[in-house]
Structures are given as C-alpha cells and as structure tokens.
Image (cartoon, rainbow, N blue to C red):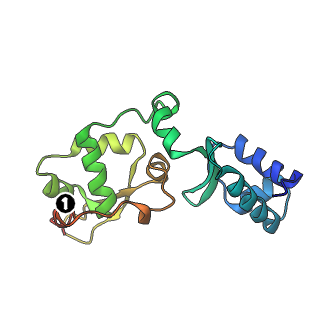
Amino acid sequence: MDFNKETALVEAVLFLESEPLSVKMISNKSQLSEEVVEQCLEKLKERYSSEDSGVELTMITGGWCLAPKKEYWDVLKELYGSKREGHLSKSAMETLAIIAYSQPITRAEIESIRGVGVDNMVRLLLDRNLIKEVGKKEAPGRPILFGTTKEFLKLFRLNSISELPKLDEDDEERFELAR
C-alpha cells in the first residue's frame, strides 16, 4: 500500500477534529478533491484494519472519524469518555432503549411500556442531549414525540439508528405495547 502525503494530510485532519466529518468537509479542510479524499479514506481503512493498530477509521453519524477500536474503547471509556456522559442508571438506559427502538414515541407510550412514570428519566435524557423532541402526535392534546439525537448515535458508535441490535421476540412485543 502506498501511503502518500495526501493520505497523511487526511489522517491529520481526522486526528485534529473531534466530530465526525463528511467527505465534503474533509475535502474543504484538506483542500483535496472529494475523489482524492475517498481514495485516502480507503488507504486509511486498510492501514487501521491491521491487528497492531489501536484505532480504526469509522463512520459515525454520517461522518468519518478516528476512534479507538471497540475492544479497546470498552476498556478505556471509563477514563476517556466524556464526563458529561456519566453513567446512566438502569432505568435511564431502559427508557433510552424504549425511545431508540420505538421512536417517535410519546411520554405516555413510554410509560405504558415501562409501567412507571418517566418524567425524571425523560428530563435526564433531554439534559444529556441523548433524546430530543421530534414533533407532536396527531392525537388529543397533541403530545410531544421523542426520538434519539446524534449524541445518542455517537455514544453508542452507530452510523444510523438502523444499526441498533435486533430485538428478540419478547422485547419486540413489549416495545409494541404503546402502538
């Protein structure tokens, strides 16, 4: 593999950025054509796929970034994860999972699935920018609909919500109670 100056430049741009970047954004920052950037990204993917690399080139939320390989991140996230992320309680994680798998969903629908009030959990998840208001339901009172955010995708290293692990039959039935 020929690792040239253009590839090194793209690597440096990715290293310096804290947010995932689209090919167009990398092109603008590096002043290379989008075609050259795409070739460089392929070289970087190949380079970082080797076993002796602790990082990988990955697409998160529709953009490219350098990130620790998953097996290392699981060990390092305690030290290097955003302090703002903190640990989510079991009930916050359950509420977040319900929203992620059932979005868009109202507070009453979440409560129907969980069987308990979720005001505090929804407020916590909104504060942490893991969920957001995505509209209002066409129903009496026009309740707020909630969905996940880009921060949610980044936290769980997903490119899109379609990459969520599949639910087993029991969970799938449980999550459909609100519908």
* Residue 16 image offset from top left, x and y in percent: 72, 40
* Residue ID at (45%, 30%): 78
Q: Secondary structure at mark 1?
A: helix
* Farthest-out residue, front: 51
Corner quadrant of residue 21: bottom right
Left or right: 24, with 95 as reference point: right
Type of amino acid at the residue the image marks with label 1? Glu
* Residue ID at (54%, 57%): 61
* Residue 110 image offset from top left, x and y in percent: 21, 56
Left or right: 21, with 133 as reference point: right
**Residue behind mark 1:** 109
The quarter of the image holding the C terminus is bottom left
| Rendered position, 3 above or below 121 | below
Left or right: 127, with 143 as reference point: right
* Residue ID at (51%, 59%): 159
Corner quadrant of residue 135: bottom left
Few, some or many residues within 10 Å of mark 1 (<14, 14–19, 20+): many
* Farthest-out residue, top: 79
* Residue 131 image offset from top left, x and y in percent: 38, 51
Corner quadrant of residue 148: bottom left
